Image: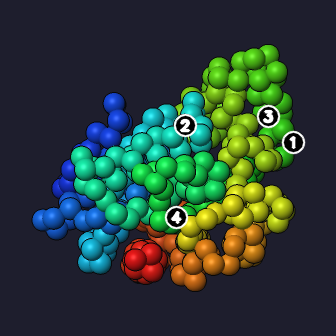
Amino acid sequence: MDHETITIHNPVEGFVHEYAPRLTAFEFKNKEVQSKKVVLFIGGLTDGLLTVPYLPDLSAGLDKIGWTLVQIHFTSSYMGWGTGSLERDAYEISLLVEYLRSERGGSREKVVLMGHSTGCQDTIQYLAKYGPKEPAKQVEGGILQAAVSDREAIFHELQKQGKGWEELEELNALARNYVSEGREYELLPKKYSDLFLGAPINAYRWLSLATKLGDDDFFSSDLTLRDNKKTFGMVTRPIMVLNSEKDQFYPDYVDKQALMNQWKLATPDKFWSPHSGLIPGALHNIGPGSAPGAVAWTVDRVCKFCTDIE
């Protein structure tokens, strides 16, 4: 998820790569020679190029340690997520990783995925579930920034309207009817889009996001250790979690630090980065309203993680 205060950037220099037909990625301008080490950034729902405000600062920080930042632009970008899936996203990410490893893509030697918001699901999906075995599609690690449960975020939005779990279950029941009738890829009525970020959304993706243990339900606070071991527990590469201390998409009842502790417990010890933590004073995308220094703190942690990868 990612509907927040809009930040308008100054022009940003870089290179556009067509990594597959009609699929592109933006590489922030680095030093004269293309770096062999890449952080591949994956935005959240409604995100597209440069919609996450800290990316120019992150690019500058990575440049100082010899890494470069590449942002994927795939079918799910902007309003495309409502008819997509994590499986489709992971496939398109694999195409970009393979491209970056190729001579045409710069023969990159290190690739670290960094998901923001629902891009965190994509990162976990790639690291734990999709896990392509081909060397050209492997990555060296993953970073989760603002890993938030979409199910709980939808409930939080309903709460603000004076509604709750009962109303959410009514919405889910209609979506289940679509699926039972073989209409899982048909668009749901407009009230679903109005409730959640405005994009047309089909029954499959709604249930994936809004139901317990749906295909997107990786980060909910009511999941058990056994549930989390099916995601975090399957990771075979280093992983770092940087959640925002003041993230406005969490319901009030969620203890963010305790939730991170649950994920750490489910993750193999050797893969959980000691640089993980709550970003002090940060809102969801570390944009306007976040505490001074929140972006710099985040960039520092990402750079430390990447240095450890080397």
- Mark nearer the viewer, 3 or 4: 4
Q: Which residue is mark 4?
A: 142
Q: Residues within 10 Å of mark 4 (few under 14, many from 20)?
A: many
- In the drawing, does residue 68 fall left or right of residue 53? left
- Mark nearer the viewer, 3 or 2: 2
Q: Which residue is mark 1?
A: 166
Q: Which residue is mark 3?
A: 172
Q: What residue is at 70 percent from the left and 43 percent from the top?
A: 215
146 and 95: which one is in front? 95
Q: Quadrant of residue 241?
A: bottom right
Say which element carries label 1: helix
- Mark nearer the viewer, 1 or 3: 3
Q: Which residue is mark 2?
A: 88
> Do tag 1 and tag 2 residues touch (Cβ < 8 Å)?
no
Does label 4 or label 2 sit earlier along the sequence?
2
**Outermost residue, right direction?**
166
Say which element carries label 4: strand
Say which element carries label 2: helix
Alpha carbon separation for disc pair 4 and 1: 36 Å
> Do tag 4 and tag 1 residues touch (Cβ < 8 Å)?
no
Does label 1 or label 2 sit earlier along the sequence?
2
Amino acid at the residue labelled 1 = Glu
Q: Position of residue 61 (x, y in %)?
A: 31, 75
Alpha carbon separation for disc pair 1 and 2: 31 Å
